[in-house]
Amino acid sequence: MIKRVTVTRESDTGRNTHFHDNVTGNDMTRQQFVRKIKAGGYNDYYVRNINGIPTPCSKPDNKAKNNLG
């Protein structure tokens, strides 16, 4: 089972900053991923506002393939 999106870089504080779409091969910054989620391109993910920063999150469910990690 291939995870759709994986985290490729984190900040010193542990915030996910860069992502890779394992299906399309695209690399994205956090801001790009947030825009694509909001545009409906990633139905298994949503955006949370954490400490004032829009943050991509996987939807809580039993699907391991959509967990960010």
Image (spheres, rainbow, N blue to C red):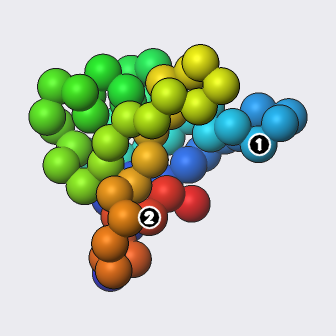
Give residue 34's quadrant in the image: top left
Q: Quadrant of the N terminus?
A: bottom left
SS class, disc 2: loop
Left or right of 34: which side holds 13? Answer: right
Report if residue 56 is visible in the image: yes
The total of numbered circles placed on residues is 2
Q: Is residue 22 visible?
A: no
Q: Nearer the viewer, residue 10 or 59?
A: 59
User: Which element carries disc 1, helix, strand or loop?
Assistant: loop
Q: Amino acid at mark 2?
A: Asn
Is 67 in front, or is 23? 67
Amino acid at pointer 1: Gly
Which residue is drawn at the image coordinates 16% and 37% (left, top)? 41
Mark 1 — residue? Answer: 14
Compared with 65, 40 (above or below) is above
Side of 13 where 3 appears, left or right: left
Q: Position of residue 3 (x, y in %)?
A: 37, 66
Q: Residue at x 14, y 34 (%)?
A: 40
Find disc 2 in the rendering and name its residue.
67
Q: Is residue 48 left or right of residue 35?
A: right
Q: Residue at x 49, y 57 (%)?
A: 68
- Say above or below: 64 vs 9: below
Asked where in the image residue 61 lies, by quadrant, the reply is bottom left
Q: What crowding class fits label 1: few (fewer than 14 Cα within 10 Å), some (14-19), or many (20 or more)?
A: few
| Residue 50 picture location, percent across and down | 59, 31
